[in-house]
Structure formats: C-alpha cells, structure tokens
Amino acid sequence: MATVSPPPHLLLLCVDLQPVFLKALPDGGASLLRRTQFVVACAAGLGLPVIFSEQMPQKLGPTAPELLEIAPKSARQLGKNSFSVFADDGIRETIKDLEIEHVLICGLETPICIYQSALEALDSQLQVTLLSDAIGARRPDDATTCLNALVRAGVHVLPSETIFYALLHDTRHPFFKSYTKLVKAHA
C-alpha cells in the first residue's frame, strides 16, 4: 500500500467504546462496534491520529479489544472521570498539543458524553463532525433530540462514508482501493 499523508489537523476521537457500555445498547452494541471498526480502520489507513477516551477505565474496563486491534500503533487510550472529553485536562492538552482543528467523533453515549464533548469542542474553537452511523445511545429518542440541538449549535452530523470519501477526494488517492475493500467488508 502506498504511503498516505494524513489530512492535517484532523483527529478521530472515539468516546467511551468500552464493552460495559456497548452491552447496554439495544442490540448489545454489535452494530455500533461494527461501524466503529470501519471508522477506526479508515482512520488508520488515512494516517489520522486516534484517541480512545475511556470513562473510569480502572472500574469500567478499557476500550473494546476489537477496536484496539485495528487502531494505529500511535493511538492513545486516555481515561477520564468527566462526561465531556474536553473537561478532562489531560485529554484536552493532548488534543491541543496535536494542533488539532477538527475532530471526528464516534462512540457513546450520544445524549451524555458525545453531546457534552461536542459542545465543549466547539467552545474550544474546534470544528466538530459527529459520525452519525458510529455513535450510539441506550435511548434513541434522546439521541435524536440531542443531535438536533448539536446541529443548531454548529456541529456537523454526517455518515462516516460521506466523510471518508470527502477526505479521499477521488479514485487516485493511494488509500482508495483499500478503502473500497473496507466499505464492502463493513456494508
């Protein structure tokens, strides 16, 4: 595979994708885990930095191993006690040190950690895109209400394929063939 230069100043932020939370979703988290595997594999293929936030990992466990296995070696797992990723000083400073301008967010839970993280990212002058097919919630109606509020606040909410095709721009991108294989494998 050809070497791919990552888009500058872009980060994939995977929020609280821990088995204990995934199991609480309506389908046991299977569909969210599958879509997030696609997202993480795409980010790795494009050379994007990846951060996995973990809610109280000492008590609730780490990120799902299926995601860590496909993540780039440079991916970071960072614990937090706050609901918003950006309320944690260590995570916020890590993102600042990476000189990130735009965060792609996947994970859970939409009405809590995703909602608060997106708003605080906006407050930190970051552009925010939620990957609509790679976020989850125990209560879908609550998620819909929160997503509508986030859109009104200036957050972009788009499917992951839309975002990754936009990053590729055209079929000549060195990652394009690998990307189309990922699209087919995770259809």
Image: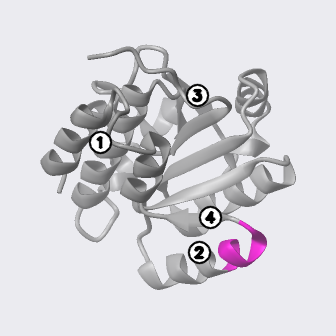
Q: Disc 2 or 1, which lies upstream in sequence?
A: 1
Q: Which mark is residue 78?
A: 3
Q: CA distance from mark 3 to mark 2?
A: 25 Å
Q: Secondary structure at mark 1?
A: helix
The residue positioned 69% from the left and 79% from the top of the image is 149
In which quadrant will I find the C terminus?
bottom left
Say if 14 sits above or below 27 in the image. Answer: above
Q: Is residue 42 left or right of residue 89?
A: left
Amino acid at dot 4: His
Q: Position of residue 8 (x, y in %)?
A: 64, 29
In this rendering, would 111 be left or right of 120? left
Type of amino acid under label 3: Leu
Between the C-alphas of marks 2 and 4, the distance is 9 Å
How busy is the neighbourhood of tag 4: few (under 14 within 10 Å), some, or many (20 plus)?
A: some
The part of the chain drawn in magenta is 149-154
Q: Earlier in the sequence, mark 1 or mark 4?
A: 1
Nearer-the-camera pick, 187 or 30: 187
Please name the residue that numbered disc 2 is placed on.
147
Residue bearing the label numbered 1: 37
Marks 3,1: beta carbons within 8 A: no
Whichever of labels 4 and 3 marks the residue nearer the N terminus, that label is 3
Question: Given contact means CB atoms under 8 Å apart, are the residues at marks 3 and 2 in contact?
Answer: no
Mark 2 element type: helix
